[in-house]
Image (cartoon, helix red, strand yellow):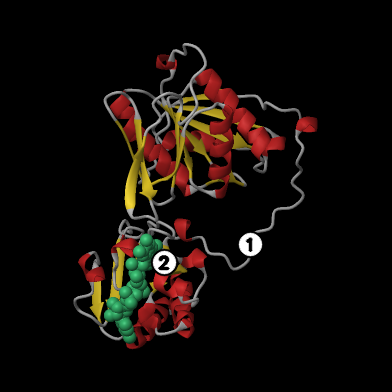
Amino acid sequence: MIGLQPEGDIDWSSYRGVMVFVEQRNGQAKPVSWQLIGEATRLAAKLNVKVMALVIGWQVSELAEESIYHGADEVYVCDSKELEHYRTRPYSRVCLHVIRKYKPEIVLMGATNTGRDLAGAIATHLPTGLTADSTQLDVDEERLLLASRPAFSEKMLATILCKQFKPQMATARAGVFEQLPRDTTRTGEVIQVPPQMDPGEIATEMIEFLETKGSVNLAEAEVIVAGGRGLGGPAAFEMLKELADELGGVVGASRAVVDLGWIGHDHQVGQTGVTVRPKLYFAIGISGAVQHVVGMQNSSYIVAINKDANAPIFKIANYAIVGDLFQIIPAIIQAVRTRKL
Ligand code: FAD
């Protein structure tokens, strides 16, 4: 951190453990939380420390158990009606209390709207360094977190270190890291944490939560039907939507078609879009540029449809279909419907 110096002689060696903030809404954890716990177990094994999870919300005790099943050794739970919906100050007060008292050396959060807001507030208060939007994490022999993220218009991968402060903080994109298989035989310790603000002290009030209509949640989708410039125009996205609906999935897109205005940016997969890890990914009329591939290559199964047999997307596809998408997609929709009958 430029310009900041730690005050006095702080014994950073008392900071031990890798902590993950388990983000939830209505008691449902965001998949990125389990993915980060998965990654935290890898880092913690290298550092020979425990994985700590922090669960904040209302009626979230089940998530403490789930955190253990997903790899946590210790779970800090703050369960209070006032914490039902995310608000920066009451949530950050709990985080600050837990971090100061239990001293994790690394704190990880999802690079979601909530994670970005919370991590920034905490890092500023502590103070410590924060790497936002990490896509790779590791630790070195000096126990330093190596948090890498795209930089300089995504043309370089920068590895950022926080040498002078603890904990070392990073947010990470959903879909980048792999969660561990849920293991219900795992056991761990659950530590209750009291809320750190009286209700009267909280300046903001949640009146109603309204989901944005029409927005797409690519990061959590199990099936993505993505289209590129090969679609020839925005109208063909209707066909992709039909296939996505049949498969219980959502529509994704390459940047080329987002830039052309054929579909909204929230559908964009890739380096400057969303990183995804669905079970099934259709790349339709997408050439397979590296900036697209980095965002979807971790999909379990990739089906690529392209009329060019030499399209780079075929190098990473599990199933390669060479041909005209306007003939192939209606045939797939028909086949899926027939199987359902
Ligand atoms: P094209 O490359 O034009 O490919 C179209 C494909 O459709 C071709 O392979 C063609 O053979 C096929 N096709 C055409 N007609 C048919 C048909 N009838 N049936 C079947 N196939 C057909 N791109 C992203 O996607 N995501 C990003 O996040 C992203 N970030 C970027 C960041 C930077 C800094 C830069 C420089 C670029 C980024 N790009 C990104 C852009 C990327 O480099 C490519 O330009 C883009 O992915 C190409 O999109 P496309 O595959 O849809 O188009």
Quarter holding the C terminus? bottom left
Q: Is there CB contact under 8 Å for labels 1 and 2?
A: no
On screen, residue 229 above or below 57: below
- How many labels sit on residues? 2
Asked whether residue 167 is in view, the answer is yes
Outermost residue, right direction? 200
Query: What type is the residue that disc 2 sits on?
Result: Ile
Question: Label 2 belongs to which residue?
Answer: 224
Residue appearing at x 41%, y 66% in the figure: 224
Dot 2: what SS?
strand
Residue where numbered disc 1 is placed: 212
Question: Where does the image place residue 47, in percent across and percent down from the top left?
Answer: 32, 25
Circle 1 packing at 10 Å, graded few (<14), some (14-19), many (20+), is few
Ranked by sequence position, the earlier of labels 1 and 2 is 1
- The answer to which quarter of the image holds residue 272 is bottom left
Query: In this picture, is 113 found above or below 236?
Result: above
Establish whether ligand 1 lies closer than 8 Å to the Cβ of label 2. no
Against 65, residue 6 (above or below) is: above
* Ligand 1, image quadrant it occupies: bottom left
Dot 1 amino acid type: Thr
Which one is nearer the viewer's eye here, 291 or 282?
Answer: 291
Which image quadrant for residue 192?
top right
Q: CA distance from mark 1 to mark 2?
A: 20 Å
